[in-house]
Image (cartoon, helix red, strand yellow):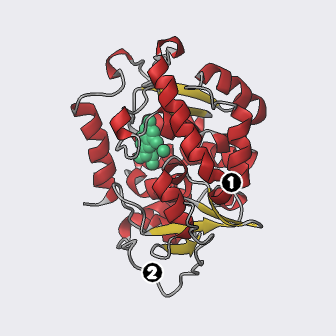
Amino acid sequence: MSETQASSNLFEANTTHALRGDYASMRADYTVDQNWGGYSEAEHDRWRRLYARQSKLLERYADRTFIEGLRALDTADGVPDFEQASDRLEAVTGWRLVGVPGLIPNDVFFRHLANRRFPVATWIRREDELDYLVEPDVFHDFFGHVPLLSNPTFADYMQSYGAAGLKCIDAETDGVLARLYWYMVEFGLIETDEGLKAYGAGMLSSMGETIFSVAAPQPNRVRFDRARVLTTDYMVDDFQKTYFVIRDYAELFDAMTDDLPEMVADAAKTESIDPATTRPGDDLVAPGQPISQFD
Ligand code: HBI
Ligand code: FE
């Protein structure tokens, strides 16, 4: 199943199965009020445990920019209040958070990003989903995605990604553009002066994949190349077989050139690359930190 199919199935699945979030009460732009007062003590406690467990890995595996962005949000004590976090974020990069019931259609999602609004699911996973979750919940969306929105370069990349996405909707190539989001926002690696680090939301909100993506010998780690990313399939329900590596966030922003929609259209016509394979032209990157016995 192609990833376009998978991600649209993922979206369909969410709209047909028992809905996590309250799609019934959402506004035309798919936003809902967070109702921060409505979280139970058990839900705040679950957030605290997820936050503490994941934070233990950050020093060793996460990019410093992510760590500093998370710290500045000061949300270890319970499910964060989106309005408070938005006020802090808006002061540095102009971004605000909007509550959503869960996955929303690509065009709606792109429009929010293009206007510096990041959609964050309002519900938190159940106790039996602590380790694995199909759809993004508030922990994935907030803990994983929000810290880097305080970095001006990454914040500008995300806004321009949304703007590009709106252009790809008409060309029906948004499924291909989704690869850029998947690999560079959800599962991106970055080379730093402290070694190879994770910055992607999908890995940093998951214990297993944080360590696997940086240190495991199995996956391919390929230096970022826009055309290569746009033609590479991705795994929707398993650890990635390929990760792409940047040297700095400016590489992402610089990739958002005016000819991106054409590049995406070309990639849509090109046979996609199996992420379990590499290509002769790939600039491969070695694994980072060896997995210590404490992990
Ligand atoms: N909706 N709420 C939400 N969060 C996402 O990350 C998201 C989405 N809809 C579509 C989507 N991501 C991806 O297909 C993007 O590549 C567009
Ligand atoms: Fe995400």
Task: Find residue 59 and name its label.
Answer: 1
Kindly report which numbered mark, 1 or 2, lies closer to the viewer in this rendering: 1
Q: Position of residue 131 (x, y in %)?
A: 40, 46
Q: What residue type is labelled 1?
A: Glu
| Picture quarter with the C terminus | bottom right
Q: Which residue lies furthest to the bottom in this view?
A: 280
51 above or below 195?
A: above
**Front in this rendered view, residue 24 or 63:** 63
Residue 123 point in image, percent of width and height? 42, 27
Quarter residue 265 falls in: bottom left
User: Which residue is at the front of the view, 271 or 203?
Assistant: 203
Residue 210 placed where, x, y %?
53, 57
Secondary structure state at the residue bearing disc 1 = helix
Residue 196, percent across and down? 65, 67
Q: Left of 169 or right of it: where is 210?
A: right
Q: Which of the pair 195/171 is nearer the observer?
A: 195
Residue 281's mark?
Answer: none
Q: Is residue 115 above or below residue 251?
A: above
Residue located 59% across and 69% down the image? 224
User: How much space separates mark 1 and mark 2, taking CA atoms?
Assistant: 30 Å
The residue at 57%/66% (across/down) is: 214
Give left or right: position of 55 versus 268.
right
Please report the residue visible at 64 percent of the width from the left and 52 percent of the height from the top. 58
> In the image, what residue type sits under mark 2?
Thr
Q: Mark 2 points at which residue?
A: 278
Picture residue at 39% right of the left edge, 36% below the top:
103
Ligand 1 occupies quarter: top left
- Categorize mark 2 by other alpha carbons within 10 Å: few (<14), some (14-19), many (20+): some
First reached walking from the N terminus: tag 1 or tag 2: 1
**Circle 2: element type:** loop
| Residue 257 visible somewhere in the drawing | no
The vertical placement of 38 against 145, above or below, is: above
